[in-house]
Amino acid sequence: MEQIKIKYLTDGIDHLCYVGGKSDWIDLHAAETITLKTGDFKLIPLGVAMEIPQGYEAHVAPRSSTFKNYGVLQVNSVGIVDCSYCGDNDQWFMPVYATRDTTITKNDRICQFRIMQNQPTLEFIQVEQLGGADRGGFGSTGR
């Protein structure tokens, strides 16, 4: 089993754990209370720094309820934290844009992450035709 060293940079936030036993994603918490006005951008501190094993990266994404509860969008859609971002001061953040006035309270579960293996090295080969079935192009499924 791989291990991840974690340093908590903020007191008063829940420690990381699997919610409901074991899930594919692990929740992250806001490290401070943040009030945003419509149109504000903010890096929400998550109060943790981690040492991800070589060959792995973390994918950070909003929880399914984040927009409904807080009206914020993660502006980079999915954050990627590579294994070189591993120092004592390399705190994780969630960059958000507020679509309405909102307050995110310290320790609110605001986003989630999972650890993924890095993509293998690939070779790209140019061809005149591909061998797969043609599905009709972008947006054609279900017509």
Image (cartoon, rainbow, N blue to C red):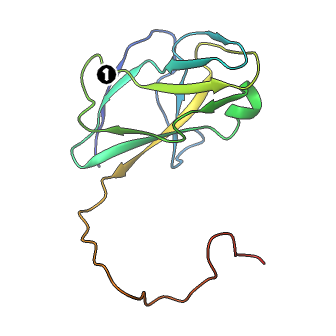
Residue at 51% over, 14% down: 31
| Nearest to the observer: residue 15 or residue 29 | 29
Task: Name the quadrant containing residue 128.
Answer: bottom left
Vertically, is 23 above or below 67? Answer: below
| Nearest to the observer: residue 101 or residue 63 | 101
Q: Residues within 10 Å of mark 1 (few under 14, many from 20)?
A: some
Counting from the top left corner in percent of width and height, residue 104 is at: 66, 16
Counting from the top left corner in percent of width and height, residue 115 is at: 39, 46
* Residue type, label 1: Asp
Residue at 23% over, 63% down: 121
Counting from the top left corner in percent of width and height, residue 82 is at: 30, 39
What is the count of numbered marks? 1
Quadrant where the C terminus is found in the figure: bottom right
Task: Name the quadrant containing residue 90.
Answer: top left
Q: Which residue is mark 1?
A: 90
| Nearest to the observer: residue 57 or residue 10 | 57
Counting from the top left corner in percent of width and height, residue 81 is at: 36, 37
Mark 1 element type: loop
